[in-house]
Image: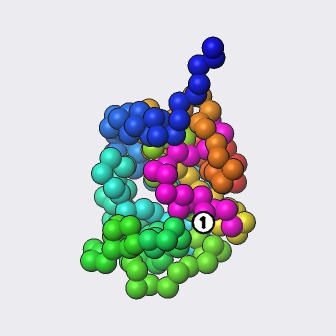
Amino acid sequence: MTPTAPTKPILRRQFRALRQQRDDQAIRSALLQVVSPSSGPKPFSPDHGYIGLYWPLPGEPDLLPLLPELQGWSLALPCSDSQGAMSYRPWDGNALNERDGCGIPAPINRPPMKPHQLQLLLVPALAIDRTGLRLGYGGGYYDRLRAQPAWRAVPALVVLPDACVSQKPLPRDPWDQPFHGWISERGCTRLTGC
């Protein structure tokens, strides 16, 4: 009898526990080196479009303390409806009183953005494997958005602790969209596209 691979729900529980072993400050420092490297080429610029951040849920790396250092950059946040669709909307970095269809703070009164307006998406995850396959919470919001070719072309990096980079391939469903790489305490690992 061959052992079966863990299912996504089992992996979600395992990686949710591992995610607690993170160093948010080190992850934020690694992110700053991506968007504003001290030397070498600068693939991203405040003049080239928005950076899509995320509002951190409990257990996710918190990027909000970087807001003062991202002054001058155009920012956006995801906004989900309760039907499974997600868009990015401009965000000025100020406190948010509105919540989207999933109950997450979001600039719901701002217009949805087009993919060409964003230069980088930063996305939370429970895990990622070495091929860029992300394990999220199971809602499929990012996969549905990135199934559209124009959105898939926007460089997208997962933000997570190094403990959640799976050395084994994660289970893949037909709708899963691989990411261009990830940012962890160890820095940025780019696979393709950015």
Give the quarter of the figure containing the C terminus: bottom right
Which image quarter is the N terminus in? top right
Where residue 168 sits, quadrant-wise, is: top right
Q: Position of residue 51 (x, y in %)?
A: 51, 66
The residue indicated by pointer 1 is 145
In the rendered view, tell whether residue 10 sits above or below residue 56: above
Residue 63 x %, y %: 37, 56
The image shows a total of numbered marks equal to 1
Relative image position of residue 142 (x, y in whole percent): 55, 60
Residue lying furthest right in this view?
149
Magenta stretch, residue numbers: 130-148
As drawn, 100 above or below 125: below
Q: Residue at x 60, y 66 (%)?
A: 145
Q: Name the one closer to the observer, 37 or 104.
A: 104
Kind of residue sitting beneath label 1:
Leu
Pick whichever, 164 or 16, lies toward us. Answer: 16
Check disc 1: other Cα within 10 Å, few if <14, some if 14-19, many if 20+: some
Foreground residue, 146 or 39? 146
Instruction: Give yes or no for residue 87 being in the magenta stretch.
Output: no
In the shown orientation, is residue 132 left or right of residue 6? right
Q: Is residue 184 above or below residue 98?
A: above
| Rendering coords of residue 16 (x, y %) | 38, 39
Q: Is residue 147 shown in magenta?
A: yes
Give the side of residue 50 with respect to residue 18, left or right.
Answer: right
